[in-house]
Image: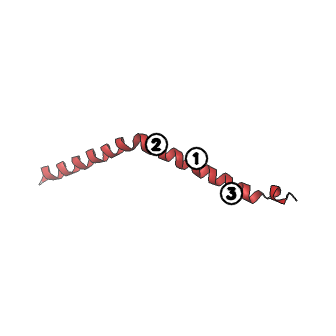
Amino acid sequence: MFRFLRNRRGQGMVEYILIIAVVVGIIFGVYKTMGGKVKDQFVKATTEIVNADVETN
């Protein structure tokens, strides 16, 4: 009657899905808080590279 309670494969899959959801949530939160700063650093580095190339030519 309660065979579904003994099925551990489904429980393991749910746990993995929950872990993945938590990791994705953390990544999304870090991206939202740090995304602008990272973008600014890439723009700054690109500008420096372009300016260094112009100075050598």
Tell me the SS state at disc 2.
Answer: helix
Give the residue drawn at x 58%, y 50%: 21
Residue 30: image tag: 2
Q: Residue furthest left?
A: 57
Residue 13: image tag: 3
Q: Quadrant of the C terminus?
A: bottom left
At label 1, which amino acid type do we have? Val
Dot 2, how many residues are within 10 Å of its Cα: few (below 14), some (14-19), or many (20+)? few
Q: Residue furthest front?
A: 1
- Asked whether, in this view, residue 36 is left or right of residue 28, the answer is left
Give the residue drawn at x 30%, y 43%: 40
Q: Earlier in the sequence, mark 2 or mark 1?
A: 1
Tell me the SS state at disc 1.
Answer: helix
Q: Earlier in the sequence, mark 2 or mark 3?
A: 3
Where is residue 9, by image quadrant? bottom right
Where is residue 41, by image quadrant? top left
- Asked whether, in this view, residue 5 is left or right of residue 47, the answer is right
Tell me if label 1 and label 3 are in contact, CB under 8 Å. Answer: no
x and y percentages locating residue 46 in the rendered image: 25, 50
Give the residue drawn at x 65%, y 54%: 16
Real-space Cα distance between discs 2 and 1?
12 Å
At label 3, which amino acid type do we have? Met
Dot 1, how many residues are within 10 Å of its Cα: few (below 14), some (14-19), or many (20+)? few
x and y percentages locating residue 38 in the rendered image: 36, 44
Q: Residue furthest right?
A: 1
At label 2, which amino acid type do we have? Val
Return the residue at label 1: 22
x and y percentages locating residue 22 in the rendered image: 58, 47
Give the residue drawn at x 53%, y 49%: 24
Q: Depth check: give the residue in front, 27 or 55.
A: 27
Q: Depth check: give the residue in front, 44 or 24.
A: 24
Real-space Cα distance between discs 2 and 3?
26 Å
